[in-house]
Image: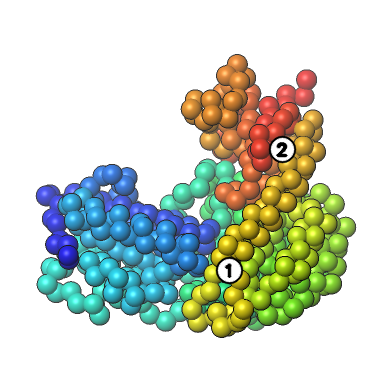
Amino acid sequence: MKAKRQRIEEPASPLRVNFISLGCAKNLVDSEKMLGLLAEAQMMPVGPDDPAEATLINTCGFIADARQESFEAIEQALEAKSRGRTAAVLVCGCLAQYWHKRLLERYPELDAVVGLDRRDRIPAIVRQIISSPPTAKNPRDRVLVGPFKEQTADDRARLRLTEQGWAYLRISEGCDRGCSFCTIPRIRGPFRSRRPESILAEAAELVADGVLEINLIGQETSGYGADLDEGLDLADLVGRLNRLEPLRWIRVLYAHPATLTDRIIEALAGGEKVAPYLDLPLQHINDRLLKLMNRSITRGQTEDLLQKLRRRIPQLAVRTTLLVGFPGETDEQFEELLQFVQDQRFEALGAFRYSAEAHTRASHLQPAVPDEVKQERYERLMMTQQRIAFDHAEGLIGRQVDCLIGRPLTDEECTSLELPAAEGPWFLGRHARQAPEIDSECLIAGVREHHGDTIVPVLITARRDYDLVGRLDSGE
């Protein structure tokens, strides 16, 4: 049954917007920028249980699990609309870009589906949707999706959702790598590097706002500059960021092994502020599967690259992402991958079970791996990595590491983690070899006057599963 539009009794000033952000770090930056634009337009974010003139959902559509999370958020918002808790529901982000027609077919009660190209117009779109009568809308009017922009957007003046001491900094958009399993080129468009002056201006803005750690993101950070006339690359960009004060850490996420050049490696090794950390998704190690995935690299080249990285940056923590259950993956090929993980002993690792995505070449490959086999392989891989990660954590006990201090832990969290109250208060933190949101954290005692814009020495004393336990090291 189609829901009727419910009116909020008295429009608030400023307009209230319930904003829901889903997906990866790139999506989070888009959410932060939209929130900044809404604030500039005198619109106020409110909590999910508060009444609002509009609910805005920034969705992810990368894989089936992400789409399901987006569907659930949309359904909850539409249910709130039917109860009069919100007057309009707008969907934006990757799923809106990728599935805009199907979204309206599935959820005809949606007021608008907004593509990535309209991100910076979101306040005007919200006002238009709120003010226009429902009878003036038809499905075509509600699909606001256009072609990809040639230039990357300006992400400055964001309303950050991350903690005070760290932020993401997007340096590129889209991807041209053409991995056979990936929908990103259809969702985010072709690869476009952001202008270096725009990046550096935003970095200065973030540092002025108290950021000590910048995490460089893009669909493929190591390819930065390939489309710029100046001949700049990631090495140049890191070198310029390295001179920014009082910035302390620069972290590189989402590099591609086929474009990680010796010049970039030297910049990572020589940058005083570059964290000894690299996010390097590899996907697989079997040569046949790498070719079917169109990864542009072989097993031998991958192993040479990893050896070079560890030799040049001795304290380097490598995080990788692997894909299990790709079409045609045999038991022998999976065992090869498992042995590779055991040999390389990655400091951090994530894995996905392959899902066939429409409009990708891999979706036509056979034979398909049964879901139960994918799950079994995924569990074996993650259990193997768990043992390795625990060994790495044990190796830090008794050592001092510099940690960026984050938020305090609640009493309930301390009790759940079995942290001794006598040593409190307890704070969350991360050392330089831990990336935000995806890696383990440090549980730190003895922090009394420090907050999220401080990096302090911490003595590691124990481990709680993946996380480390430590106390502020006074040097006594």
- Type of amino acid at the residue the image marks with label 1: Pro
Residue shown at the point (42%, 58%) measured from the top left: 69
Residue that mark 2 sits on: 402
Asked if residue 456 shows in the view, the reply is: no
Residue shown at the point (54%, 69%) measured from the top left: 355
Residue 4 lies, in percent from the top left, at 14, 62
Q: Quadrant of the C terminus?
A: top right
326 lies left or right of 66: right
Q: Quadrant of the N terminus?
A: bottom left
Residue 156 lies, in percent from the top left, at 48, 60
Residue 61 lies, in percent from the top left, at 45, 67
Residue that mark 1 sits on: 370
Q: Secondary structure at mark 2?
A: strand
Q: Which residue is at the front of the view, 225 or 343?
A: 343
Residue shown at the point (48%, 74%) measured from the top left: 187
Q: Farthest residue in the top direction? A: 422
- Type of amino acid at the residue the image marks with label 2: Asp
Q: Secondary structure at mark 1?
A: loop
89 lies left or right of 424: left
Residue 8 lies, in percent from the top left, at 15, 52
Asked if residue 406 shows in the view, the reply is: yes
Which marked residue is nearer to the observer: mark 2 or mark 1? 1
For label 1, the crowd category at 10 Å Cα-Cα, with few meaning under 14, some 14 to 19 and many 20 or more, is few
